[in-house]
Image: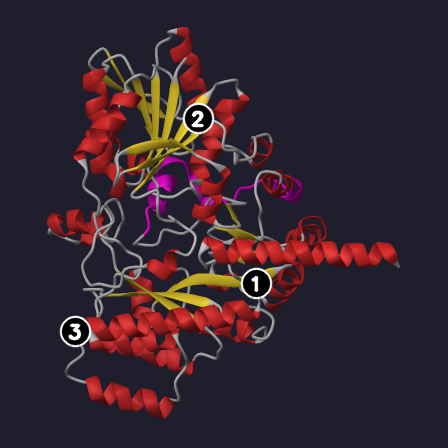
Amino acid sequence: MNIYALSMDKNLVAIGFRRVVACAAQAGYDVRSIYFLDDARKASFAGSWWKQKTGDDFNVNYVRNDAALASLATTLAGADVLALSLMSVQRNIARKLCQEVKRLNPGVQIIIGGYHPTIFPDDAIAFADAICLGEGERTFVEFLDRVRQGRSLKGLANTWVREGGEIVRNPRVPIMTPAEMERMPVMEYGVAGQHLFSYAQGTLMPLSRQDLIRHVGTTYNTIWSVGCPYRCAFCSQSRFIELDRAYADYRGPSVAYLIAEIKAAQQQFPIDYVIFYDSNFLGRDLETLTEFSRRFRQEIGLKFVLSGTNPVSIVEEKIGVLIEGGLVRIKMGFESGNDDMLQRFKRPVSTRQLRRATEVLAKFGGKMVAPSFELIVDNPFETKEQLYETLDFLDETPGPFTINLFSLQFMPGTALSQEVTDYSLIEDHMEKEYMFSYKPTALNNLISVFAILKPPRAVVAFLKNRITGREDAASPLLKTVLYRLMLVRRAVNQAKFSDYSTFPYWVMLFYHRMRTFGRRITSSFGATR
């Protein structure tokens, strides 16, 4: 059976996609994976901050190439099964591609998984034969079994399917338990059967080891646990909890499984940093984190980054244990320094708790990179006075730290988007690039200064006075200058702790070679003694 799996994530990280494909491979299926990139000639992940656009108005899907889609559709039309993983921001491209594939080969079976079909099943099923709602590891394998055996898709758990001109909403079964997750195969990080599609050029090419390194550097990106009990207004997690209450639970395999997964990746390509995207890595108990830290230090021996955790979980004992194991950098969402907005966002935290988290992290200032706090701006529900409170919050926050600013995005399916009556605003935001796309207003620019340094309070008071009454005045050039200065500050700070995980791939590769050379010299010296 000819099977193509297409990741629409626009990068090679694709954690969930890789896990689903690995399950199919374990079941004996030969799946050809394709990673859909805007431009395969440019690194899609490694060093992305360094080439980030800083304008006021630009899109996620900035490439438009219908001829490229037609060319890819011609290749995919030769499949028996086409599987896609996509977010809502890729929906328009995916729909056009699927429709063209179906036109060329009406017999191909198309299944779509990921956030978009889970949040908008009625939309996704319109251009697919089957959609998976929620976890797809087991579902995809059973889907392939049924197609291979010529069986009906009716009864395929956790899916909607199209059969006989009707849409069948199949029953749900419980999501995986930690014990079941323990039996899942680790992510596939080889290059055999892997391909890159470059949307800009319309070219499909085999993935080489060099391509993998060029796009992700020497980082290994993974998630230890899934699930989140919170229903933040700007997040789609509430939709998953509606599907199954168990999505609110933190679930994950054992420390032994995680260590084995990372070791397997180390056999595939050079790794210096492991980046965890758990929603709340620190939500585990101290005993488990201690075991992880000890085994990671002894058996992996690399640095690791936490790309998300709940500020309430920041506890001095846990941070200390993780730093001993190799923690080098941490970032988390603060969203606002104003309690009213935190409540509006339905965040499970108060400014008092945020302050406590910063005080704990400040105690480890000389042992890791300055922590990064993410804030939401350009919020129509927020007054200038409330935004000034966020500025005051930062002014009173102990350092060192840095910040990331993000425009509020009204993504479909979130509680916040339901408060917007003009749906065209939501449709517009679906195409917007959210990374550093905040407006270059005077107040935003002033807040962004804290990404570079923590200015003296007298300076902050002076600057506040200067922009009063002109908070919305736009200065794109100043925004760009401040952004570049932020990059310099972060480069210096991260280099101090040998954290090059956000640098261009060639910097990471150089560091890897120097580190490898140093270990060999140390080993040789030890052997001669």
Q: Which mark is residue 474?
A: 3
Q: Which residue is mark 1?
A: 328
494 to the left or right of 433: right
The residue lying toward the viewer, choosing from 375 and 217, is 217
CB atoms at circles 3 and 1 under 8 Å apart?
no
Residue 345 or residue 216, whichever sits in front: 216
Give the vertical position of 465 relative to 160 (above or below): below
- Look at the image and give the residue range highlighted in magenta: 235-259
**Circle 3: residue type:** Ala
Residue 487's spot in the image, x, y percent? 39, 68
Is disc 1 placed on a helix, strand or loop? strand
Judge whether residue 357 can be spotted in this image. no
User: For the stretch drawn in magenta, what is the main secondary structure?
Assistant: helix
Residue 323 picture location, percent across and down: 63, 63
Picture quarter containing residue 95?
Answer: top left
Q: Amino acid at mark 2?
A: Val
Which mark is first along the chain, 1 or 3? 1
> Mark 2 to mark 1: distance in Å?
39 Å
Residue 244 within the magenta-colored segment of the rendering? yes
